[in-house]
Amino acid sequence: MNHTEKGRSRGDERFWEAVDKAVHANGALLAEFYEIEAAKQEHDQRQQAAHLADVRAKADAWRSGRPAEGVTDTFTLAPDTVSGPAFSLNPDEADRLMYVGDNPRQIGRAALKSLAVVLHESRRLEDMIGAVPLLPASRAQLTLFEHLVVEARGPLRHRVVLLGSQYAQFAAWLHSSADQPKRAHAYYDRASEWGLEADDPNMVATVLSMKGHLAYRLNQLNLMLGLSEAAGRHKRASLGVRSLAVQQTARAYALLGNGDACDRSLDVATVLADRAAARPDREPPWIYFFSPDYLVMQRGRAYRYLGRYRQAEALLSAGLAALPPDIRSAEWALMYERDLEAVRERV
């Protein structure tokens, strides 16, 4: 299980069947495993074709004496637990997961690691298939953690509450993406409560920021601005978390028509992102998608709202081109594709 938790394997069919039973997902996680396997095969085929075309283009450029276009290096903030060789689940670990669901008082470190694997895989799965298919499983997982938090005691309680806050934050994000704001708001409250108990400043600031994002989706711009600013002021939060909050503050200023304040906030966010890039080990795992290139797209979106269409087009194009292939197809990334289409109509 340790290798799967560290992102060294996606887990096989037997693994996901065990996890599905452990969190009482009624087949939802196992069905998603089959979907992602099919999507992965199709994705790999597209990647091979794209790689071959890139090699041919660079070879043609080399022969003609023209400089070949390089791919911008990207820095992805990810936990130090995402890399390594393959892994297979053993029967003891599968049994441990199933046991936890029926005996929440007996949770141990190994079971918590197994549940961390589920969350890591769920985040990556959402990038590939979107939020809606994951909603039933996310609610089942959160129900499990509600029982675990009630029953957890002793030295492990902190770990249970800490991981539970991450599950709640992820469930809130999924429901926000699926246009279920009431559920999303309730789950963000749960994540904030558990984050405060665990004394996790990254989660507390993230919830404020993501509530600001929810306000953005609901066109509640003053609320968006206030929550984003509050998240950005959280000095104990990581540089990456604060950068995300400050860039969202900039977007709020753009929507409110304050170009100068928008530019100032974007500049601060860029400084924070550059500093964060030097210390990826200090960033929480749920902002694995964040990079300086992501911030380029955010500036492009803000400039779109300010009517700076030519600059927006250049920034959005550059940011999208630099995204890793497995992130480029995510639902949230497609929103920037739509931003790009919109500004191109105005250039």
Image (tube, rainbow, N blue to C red):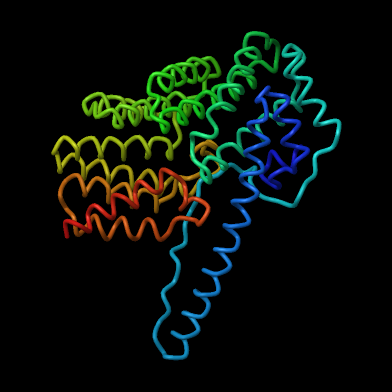
Q: x, y (%) of residue 321?
A: 40, 61
165 relative to 134, above or below: above
Q: On the picture, is 82 further left or further right than 319?
A: right
Q: Residue at x 68, y 12 (%)?
A: 152
Q: Position of residue 209 (x, y in %)?
A: 37, 29
**Front-most of 182 and 263?**
182
Nearer to us in this view, 51 or 235: 51
Q: Which of the image's four quarters has the N terminus?
A: top right
Residue 90 vertical position relative to residue 189 in the rendered view, above or below: below
Q: Quadrant of the C terminus?
A: bottom left
**Quadrant housing residue 229:** top left
Q: Position of residue 33 (x, y in %)?
A: 66, 41
Residue 78, image x, y percentages: 55, 44
The quarter of the picture where residue 159 lies is top right
Q: Is the residue 196 above or below the residue 84 in the image?
A: above
Q: Residue at coordinates 42% horizontally, 46% vertically from top-left?
A: 275
Q: Quadrant of residue 264?
A: top left
37 on left or right of 96 = left
Residue name at image x 48 percent, y 15 percent: 193
Q: What residue appears at the point 59 percent right and 57 percent down from the top-left corner?
A: 42
Farthest-out residue, bottom: 64
For the image, the number of numbered tags is 0
Lateral position of residue 90 relative to residue 188, left or right:
right
